[in-house]
Image (cartoon, rainbow, N blue to C red):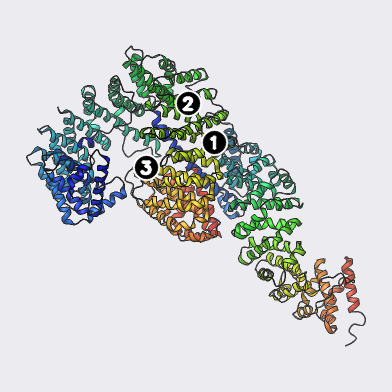
């Protein structure tokens, strides 16, 4: 036993079979391949987030500039492109690693400053090299870095964005389902930048087939991918040609995906998805009618009720407005007074009217005005809601553009829906509403509008003044108008260049404040 | 219970009897540990009992006190400590009494048991009288008592650290041992026991070794013992020198001259076991100097804790000729793989010397080669070739290239024409070494040129028809030849021969004698390497290989009703074929066009793998598991369709903690599958997580599997995102306690430091995966409670300053992930931590690009978290 224990330890002979080491090496290789893949997955996820969130956050970016003169940065960029040129040609050992780190360096330089040295990169010939790095079968890490470089270049000036033209087919190709998600995401980001540049580039992207693969990226439940795809798509379908929007809504599963994301996603993702809905509903009638039939309306309302994120509320509210304005017949079928959703809509709109943000107030008033243009029941609903006191307050205190939207709502509340039987073009009144609103002091606000230079606002003011003059019982109208300095306001139109307004004002003055006016007293 | 009979039965050749006896022993141990241990020690002490039952009683006692795996060991220690004091006292009394037994085996086993008990009790300040009573034995008259006592002291020194014993007692132990070793000790058994005791006590006597006078004395006694007339004593004394050389390298300078003379004499004249140890002394010095010189080059400081004394460089004028002489002492049948004799040890040492001194060795070896390479005696030709092959790693390519260019033609011709198999074997091996160290895309001057490439390949393929050992070495040479063309460029010089090479290798695998000399394995591994390093131009031929290997694998599955040794052979062959498919799948899966053409085979291949698993009942085939990992990556989301059938084997692999490599490979495959199918793995996660958590809490699982398990948590969280939430309450406490442990482990040695860092990395990868998985989910809130602990962990890592680069990169990434996912919830926590900011700044200014990149990202994530 003692002998076993002290048996001399023996080293491996130098001359041994390859069979001893090879299997072990294969095993280690499998482990290290797994490690590399894990790392590149994690890394890619982070890289993309930086790319994606970086642009809204200038404060952070500017912190990253480390006292570098622009000229130095440009020189570094040129030499980074040169470096890339030489490693792209190199095929020897570690070629991949060299390419990736050259790309990485260039990308770093391009991300460094608020004024990225895009021009220097382009001059040095970066685009053809980057296109080469995007070729099929390239490893993900390389694709990712190249796409990121292009993303940053695309964020430059319009001519600089156009320089990406040769890269577009490959960027689109890498959106495909077979590649890695982080790569697809980065490509989507680059394409989104291109699409955002203008109609011409949008049309090129559409003709090259960017729409379908981007739309497919919306289908799974991968948060950051969907967000980027949604952002890129909203840039792509901006129009003005509605064709792309219509095409998008026809993509199999897309509508379901929109509904799903609006239902489940966090605010950040929902924001980008809502922007897609904004452009769909603004441009395409087909899209609007499909959206209205889905759960989208309901979800938008829920989002408005739940969220406090301005970034999210804006597109959601605008989508809601687009849908309500766009397809009045369907809307009438959905937003039926007495339905739960209708009450909810009014409630969230009031919430928006009460918000701090001017944009929200304006959009909310606009949506309300569209509802107020509906049936008598719709008008009654708004009239008896929390909205009215808020609207009245806004009419006297809010900035001009909000006041105008508010005036539309209040005005609409006081007139019946236009029915074909009435021939004189003058809408009939809802007297109860008019009397009550005037009683609560809204006339002054309308007269103010008459005083404004904006013809649309002035017309609104005049129209309402006409209602008051015509409708207030016991001939009180003219007195009220006079009291609010309405006569002066209208007389200013005596020689106004806009004929319509001039006639309207003059006839009102003639009719209600003619020679007989005041004789009773 | 009649313990004697049971102990004898437990050694019966009849399996049934043996099993029954082992079962009753186990039951006895579990039911009543006290009386179990008592009756074993009584058995061991009883001079009436047969020696076989006494020996086994001792062995079981020893195993009841110690185990290899740390958790199991702790458990045994606790159980011993919990025994009643009177029981332990009785057992210890028996043990000490046995040291005086006339039966050598009983004494020897008891020595080890005593050392184990001492290993538990001395650190707890128990059994204080032990060393005193052992030392008093030394002065007893019967030599066998003295011998047993010295043996016990040796094991004791090996078992415990010197700081749990008073230096006074250390001195006394050492004195007793050295006295026993002295030439004046007349009894050889005592002297041998003392010499072996010193071997075991080498690191125990550190304090004494730092004292010049004491060290001089010890060294003198050891050197004298190397000249004892008794061969076993000489061998044991050289073993002491080997152990001293690695423990006290920096103290050897005054003795190295004398040691050289002693070793040279032993190598030249002494019997083989002694000569082998003498050579080993120099190999061990090489190990030390290679490490130190590595540190010189590797470290920024250009420094090592221990200075290099360049013993080897000074010794080579005499050392190299001595080693060259050993090469001529071949055995006639040494081609067996792993054979170990003087020639093998000498060549191995020569290789280490070459790595230590580099270019300087070449002029010392060349004359020997030139003189012997053409001699009629095969021993001279073989020794010359072996010498050449041994020195190819170490010297600069510049120094070797011109020599190799001349030698190449000679070698190629020897490989075909030499009449002796030993010479051909070593020649093929040397060619392999040439390709391994001097051929590759980083070399300035290529060894293989268009002019000789074809000839080299022709000769190697020809040699594959030679006797198995030569053919095996030729496969090895081809392996390294192919490897050198990795990263060579779009077109490989061996592409034109691809078909021919593959055909030749497949033919080798079918040789009826391919089972000898590991020929079949070498052929498949060479094939794998040829495939792995191949280029696009030969992709169609790699694809053609798929059905070929599949058919071979299919055939192994058709064989019915095998005897157990055939079954083992079948399983080995399946392993080789699965390994080959693993490499092929990896290759074809690495680019889109080849993946596309490969995928139609995926279903069938998976079917075969599943059948390979089904061949076995209890264990999982490791190679098949590895291959499945490759298939998962290549198939991507499509792999989900195999999960219902494959899952049970996955689970089986995760349960296999006895064969921990299988468990480790399976854990890796879980990660591969997560990345491939993403959230489609969800239905299986309950089972997988349960198993992984079990593994982590198991005492039996080898610790090396634990870091990958943590990383695997991260993989799963990345794949299933917020759905991971239900595992948090189980996984997080495990991760946290491992984090705590890894943050506070004192790094005893390099191995421990490396392990600790790999554990930290696994933990951090788990955190990263979980944070990233939860990002953008409404459930991120649940992670907030863990944030303070994680930040604390990062803090303590930063403050300890013993992270390696990999951990640093992962750690700063976790900081970013935490900020990114938790947003402003974490902002204030991070802002409060000064060390987080310091850590970030340090990483931002790191030289390492990957660390810097992670840090830049973390900075961005943090500023966003704070600004919101």
Q: Report if the CB atoms under discs 2 and 3 are less than 8 Å apart.
A: no
**How far separated are the C-alphas under marks 2 and 1?**
32 Å
Q: Is residue B145 left or right of residue B507?
A: left
Q: Which structural element holds mark 1?
A: helix
Q: Indicate left or right for A303 with B481 as reference.
A: right
Pointer 3 and pointer 1: residues touching (CB < 8 Å)?
no
The chain letter for the residue carrying disc 3 is B
Q: Position of residue A242 (x, y in %)?
A: 76, 53
**Residue B772 location in percent, x, y?**
52, 52
The chain carrying label 1 is A
Viewer-nearest residue: B826 or A184:
A184
Question: What SS does tag 2 mark?
Answer: helix
Residue ranking furthest to the right: A515
What residue is disc 1 on?
Answer: A96
| A306 w.r.t. B850: above or below | below
Category of crowding for the residue at label 3, using alpha-carbon neighbours closer than 10 angstroms: few (below 14), some (14–19), many (at least 20) = some
Looking at the image, the residue that sits furthest to the bottom is: A521
- What is the CA distance from the residue labelled 2 to the residue labelled 3? 31 Å
In the image, B308 versus A145, the foreground residue is A145
């Amino acid at each position: 036993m003692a002998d076993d224990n002290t048996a001399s330890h023996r080293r491996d002979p130098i001359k041994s079979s390859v069979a001893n080491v090879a299997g072990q090496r294969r095993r280690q290789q499998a482990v290290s391949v797994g490690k590399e893949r894990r790392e590149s997955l994690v890394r890619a996820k982070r890289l993309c987030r930086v790319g994606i969130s970086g642009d809204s956050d200038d404060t952070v970016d500017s912190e990253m500039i480390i006292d570098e003169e622009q000229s130095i940065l440009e020189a570094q960029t040129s030499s980074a492109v040169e470096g890339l040129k030489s490693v792209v040609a190199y095929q020897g050992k570690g070629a991949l690693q060299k390419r990736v780190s050259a790309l990485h360096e260039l990308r770093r330089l391009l991300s460094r400053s608020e004024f990225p040295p895009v021009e220097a990169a382009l001059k040095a010939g970066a685009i053809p090299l980057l296109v080469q790095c995007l070729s099929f079968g390239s490893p993900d890490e390389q694709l990712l870095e190249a796409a990121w470089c292009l993303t940053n270049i695309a964020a430059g000036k319009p001519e600089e964005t156009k320089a990406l033209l040769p890269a577009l087919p490959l960027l689109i190709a890498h959106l495909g389902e077979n590649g890695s998600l982080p790569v697809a995401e980065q490509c989507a980001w680059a394409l989104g930048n291109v699409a955002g540049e203008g109609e011409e580039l949008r049309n090129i992207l559409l003709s090259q087939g960017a729409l379908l693969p981007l739309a497919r990226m919306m289908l799974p439940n991968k948060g950051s991918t969907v967000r980027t795809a949604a952002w890129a798509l909203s840039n792509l379908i901006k129009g003005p040609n509605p064709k792309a929007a219509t095409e998008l809504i026809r993509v199999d599963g897309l509508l379901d995906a929109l509904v799903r994301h609006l239902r489940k996603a966090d605010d950040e993702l929902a924001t980008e998805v809502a922007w897609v809905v904004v452009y769909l509903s603004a441009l395409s009638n087909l899209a609007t009618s499909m959206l209205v039939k889905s759960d989208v309306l309901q979800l938008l309302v829920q989002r408005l009720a739940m969220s406090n994120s301005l970034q999210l509320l804006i597109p959601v509210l605008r989508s809601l407005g687009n849908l309500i304005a766009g397809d009045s017949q369907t809307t009438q079928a959905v937003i039926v007074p007495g339905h739960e959703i209708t009450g909810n809509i009014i409630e969230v709109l009031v919430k928006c009217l009460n918000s701090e943000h001017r944009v929200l107030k304006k959009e909310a008033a606009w949506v309300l005005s569209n509802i107020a243009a509906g049936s008598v029941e719709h008008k009654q609903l708004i009239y008896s809601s929390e909205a009215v006191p808020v609207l009245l307050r806004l009419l006297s205190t809010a900035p001009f553009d909000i006041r105008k939207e508010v005036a539309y709502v209040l005005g609409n509340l006081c007139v019946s829906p236009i029915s074909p039987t009435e021939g004189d073009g003058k809408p009939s009144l809802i007297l109860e509403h008019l009397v009550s609103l005037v009683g609560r002091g809204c006339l002054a606000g309308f007269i103010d509008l008459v005083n404004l230079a904006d013809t649309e606002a002035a017309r609104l003011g005049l129209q309402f003044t006409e209602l008051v003059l015509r409708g207030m019982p016991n001939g009180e109208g003219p007195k009220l108008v006079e009291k609010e300095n309405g006569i002066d306001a209208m007389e200013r139109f005596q020689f106004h260049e806009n004929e319509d307004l001039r006639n309207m004002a003059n006839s009102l003055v003639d009719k209600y404040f003619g020679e007989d006016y005041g004789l009773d007293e | 219970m009649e313990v004697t009979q049971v102990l004898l039965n437990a050694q019966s050749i009849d399996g049934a009897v043996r099993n029954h006896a082992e079962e009753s022993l186990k039951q006895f141990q579990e039911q009543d540990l006290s009386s179990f241990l008592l009756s074993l020690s009584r058995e061991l002490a009883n001079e009436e009992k047969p020696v076989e039952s006494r020996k086994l009683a001792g062995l079981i006692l020893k195993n009841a006190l110690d185990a290899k795996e740390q958790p199991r060991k702790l458990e045994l220690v606790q159980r011993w400590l919990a025994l009643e004091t009177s029981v332990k006292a009785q057992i210890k009394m028996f043990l000490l009494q046995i040291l005086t037994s006339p039966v050598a085996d009983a004494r020897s086993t008891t020595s080890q048991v005593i050392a184990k008990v001492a290993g538990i009790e001395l650190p707890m300040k128990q059994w204080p009288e032990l060393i005193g009573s052992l030392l008093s034995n030394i002065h007893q008259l019967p030599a066998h008592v003295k011998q047993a006592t010295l043996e016990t002291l040796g094991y004791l020194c090996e078992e415990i650290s010197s700081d749990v014993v008073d230096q006074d007692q250390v001195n006394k132990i050492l004195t007793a041992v050295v006295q026993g070793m002295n030439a004046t000790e007349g009894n050889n058994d005592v002297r041998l026991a003392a010499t072996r005791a010193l071997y075991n006590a080498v690191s125990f006597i550190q304090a004494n070794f730092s004292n010049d006078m004491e060290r001089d004395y010890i060294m003198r006694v050891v050197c004298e013992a190397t000249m004892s007339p008794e061969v076993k004593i000489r061998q044991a004394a050289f073993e002491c020198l080997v152990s001293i050389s690695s423990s006290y390298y920096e103290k050897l300078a005054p003795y190295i001259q004398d040691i050289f003379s002693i070793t040279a004499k032993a190598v030249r004249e002494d019997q083989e076991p002694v000569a082998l140890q003498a050579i080993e002394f120099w190999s061990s010095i090489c190990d030390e100097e290679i490490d130190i010189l590595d540190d010189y080059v590797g470290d920024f400081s250009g420094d090592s804790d221990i200075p290099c004394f360049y013993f080897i460089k000074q010794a080579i004028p005499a050392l190299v000729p001595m080693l060259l002489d050993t090469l001529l002492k071949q055995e006639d049948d040494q081609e067996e793989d792993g054979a170990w004799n003087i020639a093998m040890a000498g060549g191995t040492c020569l290789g280490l010397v070459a790595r230590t001194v580099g270019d300087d060795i070449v002029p010392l070896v060349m004359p020997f080669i030139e003189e012997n390479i053409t001699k009629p005696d095969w021993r001279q030709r073989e020794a010359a070739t072996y010498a050449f092959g041994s020195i190819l790693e170490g010297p600069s390519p510049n120094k070797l290239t011109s020599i190799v260019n001349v030698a190449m033609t000679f070698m190629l011709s020897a490989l075909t024409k030499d009449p002796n198999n030993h010479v051909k074997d070593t020649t093929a091996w040397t060619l392999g070494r040439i390709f391994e160290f001097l051929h590759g895309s980083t070399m300035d001057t290529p060894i293989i040129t268009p002019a000789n490439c074809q000839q080299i390949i022709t000769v190697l393929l020809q040699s594959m028809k030679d006797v198995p050992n030569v053919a095996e070495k030729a496969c090895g040479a081809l392996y390294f030849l192919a490897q050198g063309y990795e990263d060579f460029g779009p077109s490989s010089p061996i592409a034109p021969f691809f078909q021919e090479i593959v055909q030749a290798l497949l033919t080798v695998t079918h040789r009826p004698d391919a089972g000898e000399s590991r020929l079949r394995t070498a052929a498949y591994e060479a094939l794998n390497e040829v495939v792995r390093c191949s280029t696009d131009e030969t992709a169609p031929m790699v694809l053609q290989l798929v059905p070929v290997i599949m058919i071979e694998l299919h055939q192994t599955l058709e064989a019915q009703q095998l005897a157990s040794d055939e079954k083992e052979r079948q399983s080995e062959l399946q392993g080789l074929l699965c390994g080959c498919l693993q490499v092929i799948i990896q290759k074809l899966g690495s680019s889109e066009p080849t993946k596309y053409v490969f995928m139609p085979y995926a279903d069938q291949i998976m079917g075969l793998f599943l059948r390979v698993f089904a061949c076995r009942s209890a264990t999982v085939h490791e190679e098949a598991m590895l291959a499945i990992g490759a298939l998962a990556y290549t198939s991507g989301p499509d792999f989900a369709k195999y999960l219902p059938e494959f899952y049970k084997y996955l689970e089986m692999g995760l349960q296999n903690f006895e064969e921990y490599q299988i468990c480790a490979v399976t854990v890796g495959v879980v990660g591969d599958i997560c990345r491939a199918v993403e959230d489609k793995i969800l239905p299986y996660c309950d089972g997988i997580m349960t198993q992984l958590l079990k593994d982590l809490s198991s005492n039996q699982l080898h610790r090396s599997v634990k870091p990958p398990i943590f990383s695997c948590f991260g993989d799963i969280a990345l794949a299933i995102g917020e759905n991971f939430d239900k595992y948090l309450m189980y996984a997080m406490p495990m991760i946290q306690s491992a984090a705590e442990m890894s943050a506070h482990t004192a790094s005893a040695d390099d191995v421990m430091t490396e392990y600790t860092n790999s554990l930290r990395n696994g933990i951090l990868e788990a955190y990263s995966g979980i944070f990233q998985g939860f990002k953008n989910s409404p459930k991120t809130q649940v992670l907030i409670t863990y944030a303070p602990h994680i930040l604390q962990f990062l803090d303590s890592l930063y403050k300890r300053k013993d992270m390696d680069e990999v951990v640093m990169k992962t750690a700063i990434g976790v900081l970013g992930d935490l900020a990114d996912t938790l947003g402003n919830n974490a902002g204030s926590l991070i802002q409060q931590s000064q060390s987080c900011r310091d850590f970030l700044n340090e990483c931002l200014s790191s030289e390492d690009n990957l660390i810097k990149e992670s840090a830049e990202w973390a900075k961005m994530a943090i500023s966003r978290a704070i600004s919101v």
